[in-house]
Amino acid sequence: MDLSYGPRYEAFREEVRGFLAQYGHEAPRGEGLRSEKALAWQRRLIEHGYAARTIPKAYGGYGAQPDILESRIIAEAFAAARVSPGLGGQGISMLVPTLLEVGTEEQKTTFIPPTIRGEMIWCQGYSEPGAGSDLAALRTSAVVDGDDFVVNGQKIWTSTAHLADWIFCLVRTEPEAPKHQGISFLLFPMTSPGIEVRPLVDMTGVANFNEVFFTDVRVPTRQIVGQRGEGWKVANTILGHERGSLGDPNATMTRFNALLELMRQETIDGHRVIDNPLFRDRLAALQSRVLAMRLNDMRILSNKLNGEAAPLANLISKLQGTELRHELEGFAIDVLGELGLAYGANPAKQDGGSWQTSYMYFLGLIIGGGTSQIQKNIISERGLGMPREPKLAK
Amino acid sequence: MKFGLSEDQTLLDATVRRLLADQIPLDAVRRYAEGDGDQENWNALCELGLGGVLVPESAGGLGLGILDAAVLAEALGYYVTPAPFLGSAVLFPRALTQAGLSEVEPWHGRLGEALSGTLRVGVALPQAGGQRGRDGVQAAGQALSGTVTLALDDAAQAYLVGADDGALWWVGADAPGFTREAFETVDRTRRSVKITLSECPATLLSQNPAVLADLRAVAWVMLAADTLGASRAMLEKAVAYAGEREQFNRPIATFQAVKHMCAEMAAEIEPCTALVWYAAHCQDHLPQEAATTAGHAKALLGDVGQFVAKTATEVHGGMGFTDLVGLHYWFKRIGFNRQCFGNPQRVRAELAELQGW
């Protein structure tokens, strides 16, 4: 057990802190994705290697070698300073790594530079009304007509579709092939004729998601990533990424500290909530779980670093991380009792109503990105080696 | 940076597990449950060095730390091994080191006897789990009086005894005024005793309550590690059984209802691995976090162990309920570990105090 990052990395941490002290005031604070402030900050971060750090220079990145500890230190330092770590989103976090792995040279030079600079915003067209947990059952079709694919169908749960410039989209190009082998991965502009975006209001009252309808949308055949019929493989080169990042244990720890503070301040019958033995017990029980998940995360980091395998530690993190966070947010509502019901424009709302919002939002994350039930299938099959359920005879 | 076990620790773990699987299989556990002693087991384990894991090298031990001891405790829990490991090999040497006595005679010599397995040291810490009824130990001069309802090890020659004022004492089982009687518990893999002290001459090891508090924290980590090992064994047994048992013409492991039970067990157990390692590491290297992380490990493993014990038994169906399969030895050992030296509720109340809530 060696918990120190070592002198080289501590020096690097100082370097990051130095940058934050010098430039931190330039960071956007709540300005939108498209604001000049956000774009200028993104350029500044890339210039110093705190965004697009490992993207090759040829594609507009900083060109550093991947280093897990450096990335971790950057994330920690920015979080500690409460400074925006730059732009994220599915273009930067999912499409760019995919293109680096399997894109053509032309695709890399065309799409990666504006994407990492935040000038090209993407949405992800994967889920469909009939293809949720069984994503490979997707039916949106793409038929070749001359130099184009012609796309017809519908996507759902498409976050940021209303803001996006482009979409990376899974479509069925080989209807006769087995379902996993008939899918292709296409890129096309959201301004293409034949696309309609309808906002989908979720239970929190916000429309982060959309339904997207395609009617005879023409996509040049060169805008395919990978070969025809390989779209499932292409999408899976990075899908594992998304799961791990949901229910981040460090964010949960921060939230736990806010809950602790809340319990110190709120009173019931004139006594602090934290002095109530039942609430104390629940808080301590929650703290054990939050701590265990944070340590599990350190173990995952260490394993990556040392090339060691502990597959279960990874496989359980989405399931446990999102469930734990949902429980934590719900507990805070119990702490507030009737006050915790305040919502919307109610001035009695505590902490901006974030406990209620997150309580529901994390229920969304329990369902999204592979439901808890799908996670349990994955844990039992890949982690414990249990057999798949036999397919029903058709 | 490395969060996890060293190569030496992994090797130690593998060596001990091989010995436990070969020499102390479930049959041996059954014999102990039916009345045999565990001294032979303990001798075999001591030959491998288990008795000396925490004993300083100057006294002939391995001079290792609490994380190494936790690795061993996990292995013993995995095989539900009857052995006086916690008292003789962990808390006794730890107490002497913390009290600054390990290089002083007669303690130095006694450490040598303990590591060879000839001296067994039991544990009587009535305060750790919250004092019940009239339990408690008071000192008058160099003599102790009082009652400890549950003390570990029925065959120890001496006991570490915690007094109500936070002092730690050493009491010989042959001392005048010392009596012990069997305290039969649900756990058949370790025997406990009720101790009564009546003006019993004793030796003070430390008056500093911090020593007793440290012993309690270390005991929490060890019990958590034991439960972690036992829980993992129960999960593995459940997965194996589900793969063999057929109903409706297919292995029950193909039913999602069964798979999800196993996945839930794995999802609960896995983060506990990191927690137990870290809590053990803190005992030697991060004193400011030692008590809280030990408490978290003890409390969480108490709950996770209880969930796994129930769920794994259910996966086994009717067979899980029988004596034949022997799964109940794990179930009961986990149940014992949950209550011993403080159940989750008690430990969490302590955690709140420790953090100034």
Image (cartoon, coloured by chain):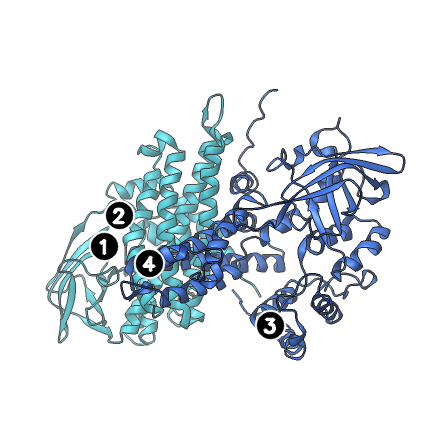
Chain colours: A blue, B cyan
Give neighbour class at mark 4: few <14, some 14-19, many 20+ (Cα, 10 Å).
some
Indicate the amino acid at tag 1: Ala
Kind of element beneath mark 4 = helix
User: Which of B3 and B38 lies nearest the eye of the viewer?
Assistant: B3
Indicate the amino acid at tag 2: Gly
- For residue B37, the mark is 2
Please give the chain letter of the residue carrying mark 2: B
Q: Quadrant of the N terminus of chain B?
A: bottom right
- For residue A279, the mark is 4
Q: Quadrant of the C terminus of chain B?
A: bottom left
| Residue bearing mark 1 | B155
Q: Is residue A7 visible?
A: yes
In the image, A104: left or right of B46? right
Label 2 – label 4 distance at C-alpha: 45 Å
Instruction: Point out the frontmost of discs 1 and 3.
Output: 3
Residue B288: x percent and y percent?
41, 72
In the image, A258: left or right of A19? left
Label 2 – label 1 distance at C-alpha: 9 Å
| Residue bearing mark 3 | A6
Disc 3 with disc 2 on a shared chain: no
Q: Is residue B51 visible?
A: no
Circles 2, 1 touching at the beta carbon (< 8 Å): yes
Give neighbour class at mark 3: few <14, some 14-19, many 20+ (Cα, 10 Å).
few
Kind of element beneath mark 3 = loop
Whichever of callouts 3 and 4 sits on the residue coming sooner in the sequence is 3
Label 1 – label 3 distance at C-alpha: 48 Å
User: Which of B106 and B8 lies nearest the eye of the viewer?
Assistant: B8
Label 4 – label 1 distance at C-alpha: 42 Å
Residue at the image point whose x is 37% and y is 35% from the top: B314
Indicate the amino acid at tag 4: Phe
Give neighbour class at mark 2: few <14, some 14-19, many 20+ (Cα, 10 Å).
some
